[in-house]
Image: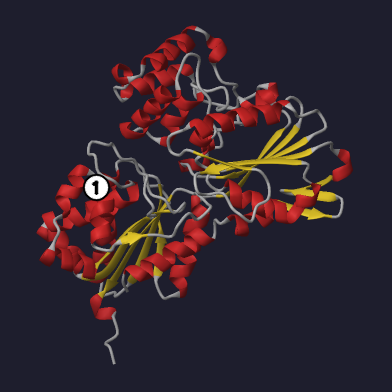
Amino acid sequence: MNGATAISVFKAGVHAVLPSVFMEMFIEGKEDEIRIGDKWINRSSIGRLVVLAMGKAAAAMALELKNRIGNQVDEALVITKDEHALATLSWPQREAGHPVPNEASIAAGTAVKNLLASLKKKDLLIVLLSGGASSLVADLPEECSLEEMQSFYKLLLASGATINEMNAIRKHYSSIKGGQLARLAGEAQIEVGVLSDVPGDELSVIASGPFYPDNSTISEVDQIIHRYQLLNQLPSSILTHLKRIKADLRYETPKPGDPVFENITHHLLATNQTALQSAAKAALEIGLEPIIFQALIEGEAREQAVLLLGHCLHEMESRTVKGLQPTLCFIAGGETTVTLTGKGKGGRNQEFVLAILAACLKDPELYERLNAFQFAILSGGTDGTDGPTDAAGAVLDNTILQNVKIYGPDPEPALTSQDAYTYFSAIDALIKTGPTQTNVMDIIIILLQNKEAIPPEE
């Protein structure tokens, strides 16, 4: 058992949440009928059929839909992350900035507004929504420049705020997010297929919930900004907008019960739990005993990494004391945060693994406890891109740990400067899958096996 084993389990989890797997359960075409979820719709009963796909998985989701009902679609617009468009998809595709919006994001926001404004009462809009759309489809508050909005997004990303908190703020600095696209669609029928990338699969949070009632408030936005001590760091136009929306409740987002949502139905298509269950099945098939953590992993990556490892080691040691020789595959999901203080390159998954490596070399007792087992530790993003890098995450096993202990380099400076990508690149421990065309947060895998249980080589 080594890093390759963990990577194979990780890839099995990712495969379960690919659009080619889950879209067939969402939509189907048959002659003059379309099935959306469990509802069949006669094509002659509706006007135009329009498709809007937004997010990191937008192109792949749109391609699967086109393969099923493409001949019945009148118009489509696909907005995805840079380098995520698909040459095999003939529908119009726009690439935009992530995790910080760029000019293409603003242009995409305008294109979406124009598309929705064209809808009539009998039209049917199918929305394919996935994570990342908060920055891919954007607009600007009054008197705010793109540079100021970009600075604001970077400030939020570096603050350590959760995705729920960041999106609560984003919704109130936009006329697109937080259910506000529903206001532009008139009386058209809207079916929204959602790929979840947030803890709890809250539809109001995924992609900032552009078609879903918003539970967050302007008052909450003010509290979050103060909680993370952002007030004195806000660009002037962002601060002006905060004062404006606090003084005028007309800027509040539409809430549950608002009639603008009467013709909108949401369908949750795949989640982090979907990926974890598939990873567990793959682990079982290769002789590992899977244990899925039900609670999602949240909080600072470096702190949660050491806590999770400690929990897994305790469970393994408890079984060993009882005379058992288990081979356990601990599987966790979620999305940690990183408060940026260094100027290195990396992402939350790479920092997660780097924190474990640094802790083991700093604490001899932890090193001995971990190295007493055959192990592999992996943390990876299901979208294939961890932070602003081309890696999904990183992996650690006995060989890597022992080589670093003997030959270096010391991981502590890289952890301090938050330069995990450079560090793991140097020791060949990065996981690179390329863009996966899906996004359901992260998968963490910790494999532990009693060395006595390993059969001797023949």
Looking at the image, which residue is at 68% across and 27% down? 114
Residue 372 lies in what quarter of the image? bottom left
Q: Looking at the image, can residue 230 be seen?
A: yes
Q: Looking at the image, can residue 205 be seen?
A: no
What residue would you read off at disc 1?
Answer: 419
Looking at the image, which residue is at 35% across and 44% down? 336
39 horizontally vs 328: left or right:
right
Of 157 and 145, the residue lying toward us = 145
User: Where in the figure is residue 407, as x and y percent of width and height?
Assistant: 12, 65
Of 16 and 410, the residue lying toward us = 410
Determine whether 162 is above or below 420 in the image: above
Query: Badge 1 local density, few (<14 within 10 Å), some, or many (20+)?
Result: many
Of 179 and 325, the residue lying toward us = 179
Q: Quadrant of the N terminus?
A: bottom left
125 horizontally vs 344: left or right:
right
Residue 158 lies in what quarter of the image? top left
User: Where in the figure is residue 65, as x and y percent of width and height?
Assistant: 69, 51
Residue 367 lies in what quarter of the image? bottom left
Q: Secondary structure at mark 1?
A: loop
Looking at the image, which residue is at 25% across and 45% down? 303
50 horizontally vs 346: left or right:
right
Q: Quadrant of the C terminus?
A: bottom left
The residue sitting at the bottom extreme is: 458
255 horizontally vs 144: left or right:
right
User: Where in the figure is residue 434, as x and y percent of width and height?
Assistant: 45, 57
Q: In the image, what residue type sits under mark 1?
A: Asp
Looking at the image, which residue is at 76% across and 52% down? 69
User: Where in the figure is residue 369, as x and y percent of width and height?
Assistant: 18, 64
